[in-house]
Image: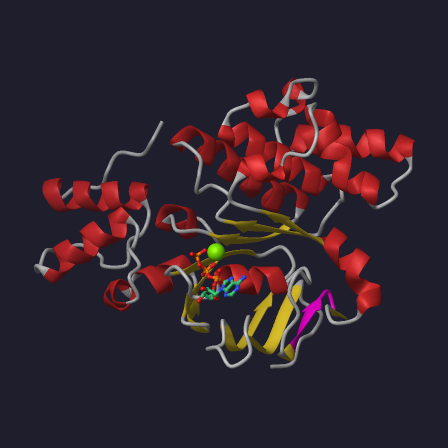
């Protein structure tokens, strides 16, 4: 695969944590274009976090190469630039807090990059506004909810003005409201700021909202397509111990039973409209 300067590009990447062990990544090639929103799915231990860590040089490939906007992660002189371009947000919000006041926490990583104070003030304010936590700027981070804490972590990454955000199960420890807040924030950053997003998740509903879904299994990429293309392959996903979004599950089940309903539905609204059509024979009334 030849890369023409995408945001992220892995070419034939193999990686093992221990010599002689089974590879955690086995000859993986994946390219993520600028501005894309990609969800990565896969059962526990299939290599999702290992892949994510290759995209900002926390890990380096044993063979193959990883490029960030064309820069090889293996070259040490690129390290600072690519850590700034690719920001990571992890699962546990408590592990990501480093300061006792929100705005200090948000400034921490960018300060370490040597951003000068005037510019720093501007960046931190903008990052807090973009992440929707400006109102909590003088609060203690540990007193915030999980969703607010994750948005503080996101703001800390935004203060570095990244081109790409990688979320490794960043919503896994949140309650439904926190998850929704973080998802809305990340989608807005993708749409309005053009930030490329790679989101590792176990929530199929979150993956259904991405532009593209990549499915991993045992160190390989086994599916790569639009959410509709991937989630209509329910049997294969189930064999990989993955679910499909509930609306897809229901419609595929009804279609299999011979009912006249499309089997490529994945969203709640289109599922509701199809059920209405099935039950009444009429088109569902448009939303107000
Ligand atoms: N630090 C480590 N040392 C040794 N082996 C590891 C290490 N981290 C991960 N592995 C192994 O590498 C493989 C891939 O792990 P990885 O954490 O990338 O999976 P994952 O898809 O992120 O899983 P999960 O959904 O549980 O987060 C697994 O077999 C795991 O046991
Ligand atoms: Mg993981």
Q: Residue at x 39, y 51 (%)?
A: 202
Q: Is residue 171 above or below residue 62?
A: above
Q: Main secondary structure of the magenta part?
A: strand
Q: Is residue 119 above or below residue 191?
A: above
Res. 83 image quadrant: bottom right
Question: Could you say which is closer to the camera, residue 23 or residue 195?
Answer: 23
Q: Residue at x 90, y 32 (%)?
A: 117
Q: Position of residue 112 (x, y in %)?
A: 82, 43
Magenta extent: 65-70
Outermost residue on the front side: it is 19
Question: Could you say which is closer to the camera, residue 175 or residue 4?
Answer: 175
Give the position of the N terminus as an image quadrant: bottom right
Tell whether position 140 is magenta: no
Give the position of the C terminus as an image quadrant: top left
Res. 286 image quadrant: top left
Q: Residue at x 56, y 20 (%)?
A: 143
Q: Residue at x 65, y 59 (%)?
A: 34
Tell whether position 66 is magenta: yes
Count the labels in the image.
Answer: 0
Q: Is residue 166 left or right of residue 233?
A: right
Q: Is residue 51 left or right of residue 195?
A: left
Q: Position of residue 110 (x, y in %)?
A: 79, 41
Q: Position of residue 197 (x, y in %)?
A: 58, 52
Question: Could you say which is closer to the camera, residue 209 or residue 40?
Answer: 40
Q: Position of residue 238 (x, y in %)?
A: 25, 63
């Amino acid at each position: 695969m030849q890369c023409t300067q995408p945001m992220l590009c892995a070419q034939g990447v193999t990686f093992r944590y221990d010599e002689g062990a089974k590879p955690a990544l086995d000859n993986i090639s994946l390219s993520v274009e600028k501005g894309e929103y990609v969800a990565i799915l896969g059962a526990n231990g299939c290599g999702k976090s290992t892949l994510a860590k290759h995209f900002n040089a926390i890990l380096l490939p044993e063979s193959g190469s990883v490029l960030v906007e064309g820069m090889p992660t293996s070259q040490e002189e690129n390290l600072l630039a690519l850590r700034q371009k690719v920001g990571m947000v992890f699962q546990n919000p408590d592990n990501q807090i480093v300061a006792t006041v929100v705005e200090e926490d948000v400034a921490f990583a960018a300060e370490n990059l040597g951003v000068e104070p005037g510019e720093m003030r501007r960046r931190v304010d903008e990052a807090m506004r973009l992440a929707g936590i400006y109102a909590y700027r003088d609060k203690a981070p540990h007193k915030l909810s999980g969703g607010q804490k994750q948005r503080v972590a996101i703001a800390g990454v935004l203060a570095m003005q990244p081109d790409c955000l990688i979320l490794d199960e960043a919503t896994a420890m949140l309650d439904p409201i926190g998850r929704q807040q973080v998802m809305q924030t990340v989608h807005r950053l993708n749409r309005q700021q053009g930030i490329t997003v790679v989101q590792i998740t176990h929530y199929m509903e979150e993956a259904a909202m991405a532009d593209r879904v990549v499915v991993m299994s045992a160190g390989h990429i086994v599916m790569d397509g639009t959410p509709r293309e991937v989630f209509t392959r329910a049997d294969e996903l189930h064999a990989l111990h993955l679910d499909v979004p509930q609306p897809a599950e229901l419609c595929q089940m009804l279609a299999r039973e011979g009912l006249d309903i499309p089997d490529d539905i994945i969203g709640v609204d289109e599922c509701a409209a199809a059920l209405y059509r099935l039950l009444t024979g009429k088109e569902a009334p448009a939303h107000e």
